[in-house]
Amino acid sequence: MTILGVDLGTTNSACGVWRNEKAELIPNALGDFLTPSVVYIDPDNQVHVGKVAQERSITEPQATASVFKRYMGTHKSLTLRGKDYTAVELSAFILSRLKEDAEKFLGETVTQAVISVPAYFNDTQRKATKQAGEMAGLTVERLVNEPTAAAIAYGLHEKPEHAQFMVLDLGGGTFDVSIMEYFSGVLEVHASSGDNFLGGEDFLEVLVNHYLEAASLNRKQLSHSELQKIRSKLEQVKRQFNTVESVTIEPILHSQTDKVTVSREQFTKLSEHLLHRIQQPIETTLRDANLRPSDLDDVILVGGATRMQSLRSAVAKMFRRLPMANIDPDLVVAMGAAIQAGLKARDQALDDVVLTDVCPYTLGTGVLNEADTAGLQGDLFSPILERNSVVPASRVASYFTVYDKQQELEFTIYQGESRLVKNNISLGSITVKVPKSKKGHEGAEVRFSYDMNGLLEVDIKVLSTGETYYKMIQNAPGELSEKELAASREKLSKLKFHPREEETNQLLIARAERLFESRLSEQRQMIQSSLKWFEGVLEKQNARDISNAQDEFCVFLDDLEQDRLF
Ligand code: AMP
């Protein structure tokens, strides 16, 4: 019986199996190993997962869901086409798709899985992951911690003796650091720390700012789609710096005439402050574990953003050795999960324990977003207790009035990792009274205390009067009851997946529709007529014609996207 190893990621997911004495990754219907963790429900109520859904997230955001892993183990639901879905249900869609891909690839039914979870996931979040598996028709034989899976992929469990190493995971928006210890068949995740607001996106932002300045463009005068175009071009440039010293960027917008050249050295210099921020959690983690960099046997890199040369050099400098990075950092966790699945099938699965109990979410309060004059973004999230803090933990922060004669301060308490409160989960609120005074003169001290049982206590003290307020919040009430699970199963059973074989066509159509929305008249007409032609070919159902048309349509869309047609 084959057990599927799954990396159920925030942005991308991947899976693999142990076959012929090695871990083998499984391609999806498009031939990719990575499937974006995005779900789209089409107007016929059919479910799409992956790249098609990702394209639709631009043109039909109200019918797509992404980054829902952040809500695992909570009751928050996302609304798609008027229906609510929990993170468990959305994850079940991803897992169903991966299961189908695996079955197609292996030519057999797959009913068992090992799924990876972040080391900081608590019991509720782990249970939710198992429930998602079960909803997708997979018995979850075991969960494996993500840093453990990465370590297994590098064969560190095969070391004959005791070994200690660090796993650095830099994704799009978060950074996680774990120290692992291997001893007689047990891998322990010791200390973990990180930065919830640091990732590859921040490096891109640095490059965007530099480019706008060098090209004399004013961000405020650019439309959303122009900025998007610049961003996606610079994302490519950021990746090019991994192999080349300098990149000359052709004009990106029609209004531009000059090229801009940026060197890798400039980029590294501009991102120095970010590279410095990476150092802090590494130091904290080492200190917590009472270790020096030289005590570590290896450093492992995970997450797409660890491909950056500047990051690799900074890490190499810190540890005076090269980090391990020869396995694709986006696939290393899936590889490890597949190996663990293979070990499990032979009853040799590695024991994997997390020793520190950490807070699995960031907890904080909302504050006024002064830059948001149009009211589009809403309040900003001000973290008080950061995710990954070792519990029990207690932290304090102060807040002040924002206008003259303000009489009340309202504290809404949120859990989540987004900088905007509207994307986080509201846990409750407290309003405190302050004496009338000038803006910024009155304020309150807010203390958050979080314990092992997920209990959050909020103590607020008004600075001038000393008056105190208290609220207790039972956090993470997220476990689904049996009744809720049955209702979920019933709901999901009514939905059908869009046929896997049509995914390539669906993706081309979704891409064309996205480009149609972002372009103007002349180009729109071209897209419209190409789309009609392509749909005409599909209707005739001749396999060879369809295959040729796919190639041709793809070249057309590539050219259009790269502005090569004009
Ligand atoms: P993840 O969440 O692990 O998929 O990480 C995505 C982040 O990795 C994004 O910020 C990407 O810009 C970044 N990334 C992916 N590939 C590369 C690459 N080849 N070079 C630099 N950054 C990359």
Image (cartoon, rainbow, N blue to C red):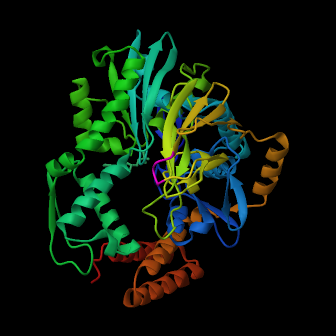
In this view, the residue in front, 159 or 475, is 475
Based on the displayed image, in which of its 4 quarters is residue 430 positioned?
Answer: top right
Q: From the image, which quarter does the N terminus lie in? A: top right
The answer to whether residue 14 of the structure is visible from this angle is no
The answer to whether residue 167 of the structure is visible from this angle is yes
Based on the displayed image, in which of its 4 quarters is residue 303 positioned?
Answer: top left
Q: Residue furthest right?
A: 483
Q: Is residue 183 above or below residue 451?
A: above
Q: Is residue 10 above or below residue 277?
A: below
Residue at 73% over, 45% down: 135
Residue at 58% over, 77% down: 541
How many discs mark residues in the rendered view? Answer: 0
Instruction: Assign the magenta stretch its main secondary structure.
Output: loop
Q: From the image, which quarter does the C terminus lie in? A: bottom left
In this view, the residue in front, 16 or 526, is 526
The picture places residue 292, in percent across and down from the top left corner, at 31, 16
The picture places residue 358, in percent across and down from the top left corner, at 55, 27
The picture places residue 540, in percent across and down from the top left corner, at 58, 82
Residue at 72% over, 59% down: 84
Based on the displayed image, in which of its 4 quarters is residue 287 positioned?
Answer: top left
Q: Is residue 66 above or below residue 552?
A: above
Q: Is residue 439 magenta?
A: yes
In this view, the residue in front, 480 or 436, is 436
The picture places residue 306, in percent across and down from the top left corner, at 33, 41
Magenta region, residue range: 438-442
In this view, the residue in front, 135 or 245, is 245
Is residue 551 found left or right of 471 in the rendered image?
left
